[in-house]
Image (tube, rainbow, N blue to C red):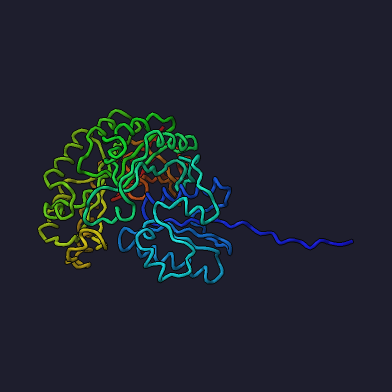
Amino acid sequence: MKVKPSKSIITPPRVNVITLGCSKNTYDSEVLMGQLNGNKMEVVHEANNVRSNDIVVINTCGFIDNAKQESIDTILQYSELKDQGKIGKVIVTGCLSERYTPELSSEITNIDAWFGTNDLPNLLSAVGADYKYELLGERMLTTPSHFAYFKIAEGCNRPCSFCAIPLMRGKHLSKPIEDLVKEAKFLAKNGTKELILIAQDLTYYGLDLYNERKLADLMRHLSDVDGIEWIRLQYAYPSGFPMEILDVMNERSNICKYLDMPLQHISDPMLQSMRRGTTKQKTIDLVNKIRDKVPNIAMRTTLICGYPGETEDDFNQMRDWVEGTRFDRLGCFTYSHEEKTHAHDLVDDVSQEVKEQRVEDVMEIQQAISYDLNQQKVGNTYKVLIDKLEGDYFVGRTEFDSPEVDNEVLIDAKSNYVTPGSFVNAKIDRAEDFDLYGTIVK
């Protein structure tokens, strides 16, 4: 009897997506993964193990120096694994690739393909997949399923002098309201309870598509989607701020009393050089108007220290303003001198040491503010969304906190049991600088 020779089984390649940078990149990776899944391909996110036929797709960040270096280091790491035969292909996409492909490809020569921020159909083709238009709104979440970053627009039309985003992401392009509602319904159907609205500039939404700002209308439409219990706004630009969105906040119980508005500085010379389209007094008036209209709103901002020409007086104005304004949440960053931006023509004349010291000074002030504001929460009860179980605690957030960047509520797992993704009422028993400790109440 003749025995047929056995055929070796060829395992189809797996696509391992690596995401670097901000929540906008997270969203883009999720859309890519949704397309790959729709093509019946095996796809994983940041798998710890590697396979010899893996296709690794690195979604890079090119925003500031530290982010660029992390992206380059990651590309080099997987480039070396490819040389060692431990993975099959390496493909690079995202902001760094959009901006620096000629320079990077001449130095790192074994990358299989480089793609920019708007090359999804071509990227899919490179891994043997088709772009499926019918998958609008469908993506594979890399966050816990109960919350999702929700990108409502791409690109930016703002002229900020320090920012390279328009170079990497292009002009502002709003997504149609009906498409976003469809996406929200798909997410809600699959267990998402919180939508975190993101864009380079939320408040510009609709101007390109409808010839008027439409963020308030979009918020109402999303608020009507069954199953969505929280809607949160991130990345709202102060110039031309549409005050009507605050009316929607007050009208709708499922829109969080939370606003992330990067203000960057307060000194008039700095705001003018940054090309922010506002002034110190207009910024102060805007913050006061927002707080008057939504008295219990939590406001988050981000600031830049060490911008070219920043004097001691400029910085002291910022420090005193932070101390007096008492933002609920605040992040602070050192200025990064970016090629081809308007500010790159200026002399980067503040030393790195001074930049870092100024950031430390601002964050020390904010730490004390956060501690004081958290102490005022002790004894109060809040609706809390449980994100995860970590060590001895269930970790959750109030409506006043975004994931990763803001305060957390810690609930003792030994005496309380809850399911991640569920809402509970928690009484705050004690508070630290950036953490609240609570007990579940019925």
Position of the C terminus by quadrant: top left
Lateral position of residue 440 relative to residue 371, left or right: right
**Residue 52 placement: quadrant:** bottom right
Lateral position of residue 74 relative to residue 9, left or right: left
Q: Which residue is drawn at 56% across and 69% down?
A: 85
Q: Which of 286 and 210 is in front in this view?
A: 210
Query: Residue 97's spot in the image, x, y percent?
Result: 39, 60
Query: Residue 198's spot in the image, x, y percent?
Result: 34, 44
Residue at the extreme right of the image, as rendered? 1
Q: Nearer the viewer, residue 63 or 121?
A: 121
Q: Where 225 sits versus 343, above or below?
A: above
Q: Residue at x 39, y 53 (%)?
A: 117
Lateral position of residue 53 relative to residue 376, left or right: right
Total count of labels? 0
Q: Residue at x 33, y 30 (%)?
A: 220
Query: Residue 278's spot in the image, x, y percent?
Result: 15, 46
Query: Residue 30's spot in the image, x, y percent?
Result: 46, 48
Q: Where 415 sits versus 122, above or below?
A: above
Q: Residue at x 47, y 42 (%)?
A: 145
Lateral position of residue 84 relative to residue 92, left or right: right
Residue at the extreme left of the image, as rendered? 313
**Residue 441 placement: quadrant:** top left
Position of the N terminus by quadrant: bottom right
